[in-house]
Amino acid sequence: MSTISLSPGTAHVNGKWDDGGDRNVTTIINPATENPVGEVYESTVDDVNRAVAAASAAFDDGRGAWPRMSPKERSAALQRFTDAIVARRDDLQFIMENEIGCAGMAGKISQIDEAIRVISYWAEHAADLTFDEALPPAAGLTGMGQALIRREPAGVVGAITPFNYPILLNLWKIGPALATGNTMVLKPSPYTPFSALILADAAAGAGLPDGVLNVITGGIDEARALTEHPDVAVMSFTGSNTVGRQVMSQAAGTLKRVVLELGGKSPHIVFADTDLDNPNLMASLIMGFTMHAGQGCVLHTRMLVERPIYDELAERLTGALGYLTVGDPADPSSDMGPLINAAARDRVLGYIQSGLDEGATLAAGGNRPAHLERGFFVEPTLFTNVTNQMRIAREEIFGPVGVMIPFDGQDEAIAIANDTPYGLGGGVWSGDSAKAFEVGGALRAGYVFINGGDRTFGGPIGPAPFGGYKQSGVGREHGAAGADEYMEIKTMHYPVG
Ligand code: NAD
């Protein structure tokens, strides 16, 4: 049995590991084998306060070494940080397989390669971020003088992240927040703490000033203390809608800015004029609900299929699912791994039962895999004859369960797609690309793939903003919009001439 020996398993505050002391110890479990992979000392609320104090001292009202560094110097420091992460690739691979439990090529690429690409992007772009912009005197405004628009780092960023893509999602926040000159206290999911602790260790090894990146462990009390802390300027949260609502209300007492990246139930629309033999179509539909065992916010789990091709596509999908190998992520032949824990597995099985109870047809899967005695696995599962009113069509299952809903014509496709409280993603397939773009434009969602754009996933994510409409979130990550979430914007007016 392998264990994680990457760190003492304590929080990493002000550039060094904390002492374990008499803090509670949690055992982290490999979700595929149910064997322990490491132990973590849980931070306390006092530790949270200490971490915020370290981050505040490093920021020091904008007078700290990090916010005052030139963009080029910060870029060089983040490049060293990136190199330090790349040097730990073997550790990241071990974490991905044993802590996160992610199998399959696409999932693995997103967990590690994509994570490295994200921090590389911010390391590079830290050098050319624009902090000052002089507005040209507009014709009608000359009498009012001119204006200098200045962007300044907001201060201490509190970041709270989920378990499903922890290396990637931690770097989604660390990258733009640090590139724009903020300091950070990060609290990862209690199920995947090592994914964050290794980043704090890499930051210290790369020579980032003490207090710039602090990682605390722990659960709800610590998370709440961070969101309520008066010295935290921005709270950047990724996780479920239930907790997102709590974060918003906890942050309200200090009126801090919140960035919320929440759940989804994204539609994947397939029109009858789509070439069903396009191999990208099948890969995209299957990945849309089985990648990382369906534990992805923006996965396209709600397939809307035009009626003339509905039966044919259902048959093809059912057949293709039979070729997926479910097993331990450490085994390279596994295409799909487990869910994160027993509670998640049981929740997903409960959703499958609700689909049966509400009259949907189980076309594939539906059970724990018979060949796996241990681990939190659920078979890749497909429901047909689903209506958009069923729970399996309305609620985020966060497991490997896809549903197929028939539709007639473009208007009905758009109506069903938008009939959801969520608005994170969507996908459209049509032989007529103008129609695909028209429908993509009509979706009330922040991140839309046209004709298999997800097969090039990993392409535009650096500068392209990501985030949810409606109850899928508040604010954006990535690109200029993402950077702005971590900055205050000041206008300075001055006389002309
Ligand atoms: P979760 O909401 O249960 O937990 C997320 C984090 O919130 C954890 O670190 C947890 O300790 C913390 N937390 C718990 N109670 C808190 C409180 N009262 N205040 C502040 N923080 C608290 O989510 P999860 O199960 O880890 O992750 C799955 C969810 O995340 C899904 O809903 C998924 O869609 C969403 N997600 C969204 C995105 C996105 O970018 N939109 C990306 C990945 C995951």
Image: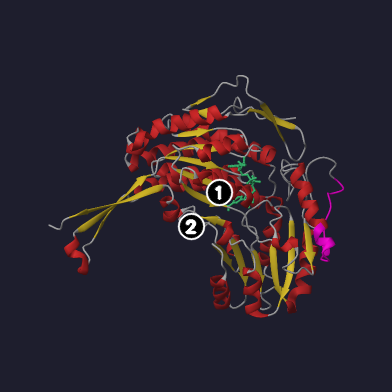
**Is residue 200 depicted above or below 268 in this figure?**
above
In percent of width and height, residue 208 lies at 42, 32
Going 74% across and 77% down the picture, which residue do you hit? 307
Q: Quadrant of the C terminus?
A: bottom left
| Res 247 seen here | yes
**Is residue 334 depicted above or below 76 in this figure?**
below
Asked which secondary structure carries label 2, the reply is: loop
Pick whichever, 346 or 378, lies toward us. Answer: 346
Pick whichever, 79 or 308, lies toward us. Answer: 308
Going 72% across and 40% down the picture, which residue do you hit? 330
| Res 88 seen here | no
In percent of width and height, residue 140 lies at 21, 69
| Residue situated furthest top in the rendering | 21
Say which amino acid is labelled 2. Answer: Pro
Q: Quadrant of the N terminus?
A: top right
Query: Residue 465 has which mark?
Result: 2
Q: Which residues are magenta?
A: 354-371
Query: Residue 114 has which mark?
Result: 1
Residue 146 lies left or right of residue 371; in this view the side is: left
Could you tell which of marks 2 and 1 lies nearer the N-terminus? 1
Query: Residue 279 has which mark?
Result: none
**Is residue 237 depicted above or below 87 in this figure?**
below
